[in-house]
Amino acid sequence: MSIFDAFDRIAANSTAARGKIEYVIVGLGNPGLEYEGSRHNAGFFTIDLLAEQLGEKIDRLRFKGKTAEVTIEGKRCLLLKPTTYMNNSGEAVVQALEFYKIDTANLIVIYDDISLEPGRLRIRRKGSHGGHNGIRSIIELTGKDDFPRVNIGFGKKPHPDYDLAKWVLGKFSADGKAKLAEAAANACECIKLMVQDKTDEAMNKYNS
């Protein structure tokens, strides 16, 4: 047994003592100071806010990401921020799902969406990747697209010729930050409903 296997076994025993993990909740983004505050990191921002509301920090390194074990509305959940960079997000997600033997139906992913106006949300039960490389990676590596997700809008490029990578990796304006904060707070409320099997209620209340 490797030292990493031993650590994971200890973690599993510790988790069992507190209750089995039922949901894996993932916020997508890119690690590193250069990406902090970027539009592409809306998922990171939101899941950090959720952890803060729960009195936790997502700072334990596991599953190719930073994690925290929390209880949301009576459900044991793993919060996960992949450190694989956006295009390889599925690597972290698959490791967590396989470790806890959780199906994709109990995976919830929070991520940025260029097709939505700033501050808007869209909750869906499943769907294609829609051109988002983080979601593309998760679908390719799990082989499924039936996982719920919460999309956070930040708006289209200023004009058609504007470089897409520059736009998604750019920083939020002051107004954009305010809209992101409001959207992230609403997304946290969505998560609290979704783990109670109230996704329809979340959709009816918050979908734009």
Image (cartoon, rainbow, N blue to C red):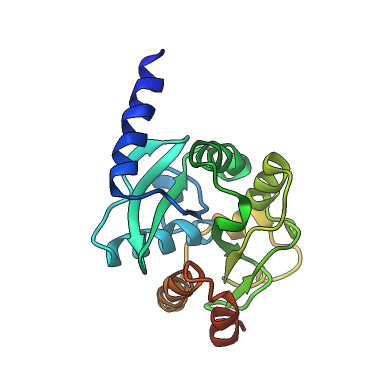
Quarter of the picture containing the N terminus is top left
Q: Quadrant of residue 123?
A: bottom right
Q: Where is residue 194 in the image (x, y as percent from the top left)?
A: 51, 70
Q: Which residue lies furthest to the left in this view?
A: 55
- The residue that appears at 36% across and 59% down in the rendered structure is 48
Q: Is residue 180 visible?
A: no
Label total for image: 0
Q: Can residue 149 be seen in this view?
A: yes
Q: Where is residue 132 in the image (x, y as percent from the top left)?
A: 68, 55
Locate residue 92 relative to residue 188 in the image: left or right: right
Along the line of sight, the residue nearer the viewer: 97 or 165: 97
Quarter of the picture containing the C terminus is bottom right
- The residue that appears at 44% across and 56% down in the rendered structure is 44
Along the line of sight, the residue nearer the viewer: 13 or 37: 13
Q: Where is residue 173 in the image (x, y as percent from the top left)?
A: 45, 71
Q: Position of residue 7 (x, y in %)?
A: 33, 26
**Residue 102, relative to residue 5: is it above or below?**
below
**Residue 48, relative to residue 84: is it above or below?**
below
Q: In which quarter of the image is residue 90?
A: top right
Q: Quadrant of residue 89?
A: top right
- The residue that appears at 52% across and 53% down in the rendered structure is 28
Q: Residue furthest bottom?
A: 205
Locate residue 22 relative to residue 61 in the image: left or right: right
